Amino acid sequence: MAGSNSTVQRRGGFGKFFRGVKAELRKVVWPTKKELINYTIVVFIVTVFIAALIGVVDAIFAQLFNMLMHFVG
């Protein structure tokens, strides 16, 4: 019985899927141009901040590693 049930679910496959996608996209509340620009700026600033933070932490660990190698070697 399980095999016949899965066959029924596959009928109308791609067409049903794309109709469902189209129906869901109609429900989406799209951001305004101003909101989109603001969100983009926020993402850019956060990305630059995180990259700088990772760079600083990497530099600190590199210095610690070099000091450790100086004492060991």
Image: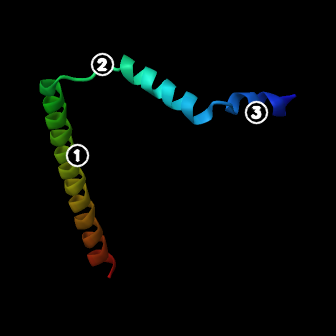
The local secondary structure at tag 1 comes to: helix
Relative image position of residue 44 (x, y in whole percent): 17, 42
Quarter holding the C terminus? Answer: bottom left
Q: Nearer the viewer, residue 10 or 34?
A: 10
Quadrant hosting residue 60: bottom left
Q: Is residue 71 left or right of residue 34?
A: right
Q: Quadrant of the N terminus?
A: top right
Q: Is residue 63 above or below residue 24?
A: below
Which label lies toward us, 2 or 1? 2
Q: Residue at x 57, y 28 (%)?
A: 16
Residue 10: quadrant of the picture: top right
User: Looking at the picture, how far across and down is residue 38, in whole percent?
Assistant: 14, 29
Q: Nearer the viewer, residue 13 or 47?
A: 13
User: Residue beneath label 2, please?
Assistant: 29
Q: Which mark is residue 73?
A: none
Q: Is residue 50 left or right of residue 10?
A: left
SS state under label 3: helix
Marks 3 and 2: which is nearer the front?
Answer: 3
Q: Which residue is mark 1?
A: 50
Q: Which residue is mark 3?
A: 7
Of mark 2 and mark 1, the one earlier in the sequence is 2
Whether pointer 2 and pointer 1 mark residues with C-beta atoms closer than 8 Å, the reply is no
Amino acid type at image mark 1? Ile
* Element type where label 2 sits in the image: loop
Kindly identify the amino acid type of the residue bearing the numbered disc 2. Answer: Val
User: Looking at the picture, how far across and down is residue 49, in whole percent?
Assistant: 17, 44
Residue at x-position 14% and y-position 36% = 41
Q: CA distance from mark 2 to mark 1?
A: 29 Å
Image vertical order of residue 16 relative to residue 61, above or below: above
Q: Nearer the viewer, residue 39 or 49?
A: 39
Question: What percent of the width, then of the height, locates residue 55?
Answer: 21, 56
